[in-house]
Amino acid sequence: MNQQLKTPVTPRDAAAMILLRDPEDPKVLWVKRARTLAFMANYHAFPGGQRDAEDAEIPIINDEGLEDAVMRTVAIREIFEEAGVLIARGVEKLSTEKIAKLRRAHSADEISFKDLLESEGLELDAALLKEAPRWVTPPHMPRRYDTRFYSAWLPEGQDIEIIPGELEEGEWIRPDEALKRWVDGDCLIVTPIFAALQALSGGVHDFADRMHAVNQDQRDHLEKRVEMRYGFYLSPLRTPTIPPATHTNCYIVGGDEMVVIDPGSPYDDQQEMLDEVIDQFIDEGRKIREIIITHLHPDHIGGVAHLAQKYNLPVAAHRLTAEAISDEVQVDRIIEDGETITLSEKSSGLDWRLRAMWTPGHAKGHLSFYEERTGSLLTGDCVVGFGTVVIAPPEGNMNDYLDSLRHYLELPRITALMPGHGPVIADAKRKIEEYIDHRFERERMIIEAMKGGASRSDQIVKAVYTDVPQTMHQLAELSVLAHLGKLESDGLVKRIDDDYRLCI
């Protein structure tokens, strides 16, 4: 499949509310998204959501000359639905009990938001909201939103109430404290939330104007080097990888000194984009120490030679990876299991200590990197942000892979998984446990298929992978062979030529 020709997902219209309180000691409302959500699970964000069909039917005053005025309605409706805060002219006549009752009725679909406003004689007013910059989810993401951000002050006499569901919790927090938690690795946020918090920390009354002063080129650059954590930058690069992925995540980690992990794209335009990111870091006075490879697959090494030559950088990898790619990439340094790579920053006094973990299974020389201070785990292709991991013998080994996942669970604190493909994962331990459970469920299904008469790997694929398109069955067969190899080593299966027989 030619990943260069894949059409990006069309963004959906959405709005988010930056809700403020206590002008003398300003705080902002942020919420923690539920772990069950398909998008940004367990991330911290501002309340918000998609545009509904009826939003355009709700009158809003003082909207003359405003672009997409209906999106202010979306933001007001969402903050009411998610946090129980009603921002409207005339709301001061309603008691908190009445507002809560109206919210319950609306949540139960007993009354629309439009009818709710009309029944209480309330008017939405665009002047109550301040417009902040608009952000569009980058093209490489499988789910995208064109999100308008607005700010407003909490109406007098009201407070928030988070009903568990799409959100786990909500909290009023000083912007500086929110940023400190992010630096310490206690939360995950995306670029628009970070940009808003950073602007709010410099003063709330003109923060939106200061954000608008940042030009589009500067904002685009932030999405080319997404700072997922302080000192952890992600540059998604289009690569010839396995669907549903279209990009490989290149990570640049550190402070005054930095390392580049998996510059995997062989495409000129993507290499040029990464060059721009590296040049910006160098212009900021940082030094790029070396390139690190997590494993041998082409979508992780495709840009290594270019970057090494352009910036005269040494390349480091596991011994088994170095041996396997010696004809394509010169590896200058071998990384040993348990080795620690320390990167420092004088201005903050912070260190990033990347502990190398040999995690074979997907590939024999696969490395992961664990940063204990923040609990960040760079997983390469041991865990990915969407889809599944292909274990393809003879390079892949299912027993080794499961051992590697269990090794992850032994770490003292994991707050985020930074995968080779897809979004960074906040609910880290649960995701690893899901991966292990998924593999054992596939193994159970394989055994059941064999009990039903399937004996060849292609027959097992047809019986087991009914949830996978037939175009992906060739890849699925590789994982079946890996499972069969594990079952054989466990003494549960016996192989006779291309046939497999149960021993139980």
Image (cartoon, grey):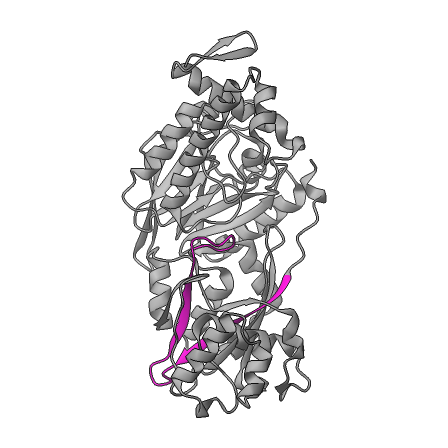
Q: Look at the image and give the residue range highlighted in magenta.
A: 12-41
Instruction: Tell me if 307 is positioned left or right of 333 in this view.
Output: right
Does residue 213 sit above or below 247 in this rendering? below
In this view, the residue in front, 100 or 167, is: 100
Name which residue lies at 53% across and 49% down. 235
Q: Furthest residue to the right?
A: 5
Front one among 56 and 260: 56
Whether residue 137 is in magenta: the answer is no
For the point 52% across and 90% down, the residue is 89
Please identify the quadrant where the N terminus is shown.
Answer: top right
Residue 214 in the image, given as x and y percentages of width and height: 56, 71
Q: Quadrant of residue 75?
A: bottom right
Residue pictured at 51% horizontal, 65% vertical = 192
**Residue at screen point 45% across, 32% down:** 441
Q: Residue 112 falls in which quadrant of the image?
A: bottom right
Q: Position of residue 272 (x, y in %)?
A: 63, 47
Image: 300 above or below 363: below
Q: Furthest residue to the front?
A: 110
Q: Which residue is outermost to the top?
A: 496
Q: Position of residue 433 (x, y in %)?
A: 38, 39
- Magenta stretch holds residue 33: yes
